[in-house]
Image (spheres, rainbow, N blue to C red):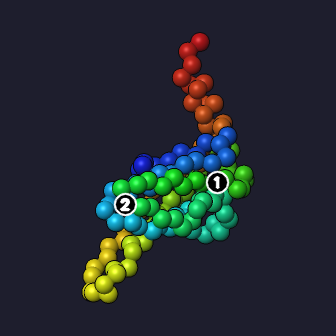
Amino acid sequence: MLNSTRYVFDEKRENISVQVDNQSTQEYGGQIWIENQDKNDKNVYFVPSPTFFKVADQHKQILRILKINDVLPKDKESLFWINVQEIPKAPKDGANTLAIALHTQVKMFYRPDAIEREKGKRRAKY
């Protein structure tokens, strides 16, 4: 379970944190990746770290999303998708079992500094 349903990555930041919370009674593995909203855009703007992780039962794991490319539009927000895939442990006894692995996808907005300044100007009363 993620700690938010959407994330905002401000231009001035180098990274943001994503928290994965394992409320289960068993350890889970996981994988995180970022997708561009435009499927034809093959550029990489953000990299999650670590991409593969393990979360003990009833524990939390902090993941970082790092900005590696600064060529995004400065006059509008850009939309990306954060994907987190659960990877359950294999059963120890080899019996037939059903393992459910959830795939969570949430929005991440890249917000340029110019957008924040414009918002502030509109709120200011002279």
Residue nearest the observer in this picture, 107 or 87: 87
Residue denoted by label 1: 66
Above or below, 77 relative to 105: above
Q: CA distance from mark 1 to mark 2?
A: 27 Å
* Residue at the image point whose x is 63% and y is 66% from the top: 41
Quadrant where the C terminus is found in the figure: top right
Q: Which mark is residue 99?
A: none
Q: Residues within 10 Å of mark 2 (few under 14, many from 20)?
A: some
- The mark lying in front, picked from 1 and 2, is 2
Above or below, 88 relative to 15: below
Indicate left or right for 80 with 12 as reference: left
Ranked by sequence position, the earlier of labels 1 and 2 is 2
Amino acid tagged 1 = Leu
Determine which quarter of the picture holds residue 122: top right
* Residue at the image point whose x is 55% and y is 15% from the top: 125
Number of labels in the image equals: 2
Q: Which mark is residue 57?
A: 2
Q: Secondary structure at mark 2?
A: loop
Q: Looking at the picture, how far across and down is residue 100, in whole percent?
A: 32, 73
Determine which quarter of the picture holds residue 119: top right
Q: Looking at the picture, how far across and down is residue 9, in whole percent?
A: 58, 46
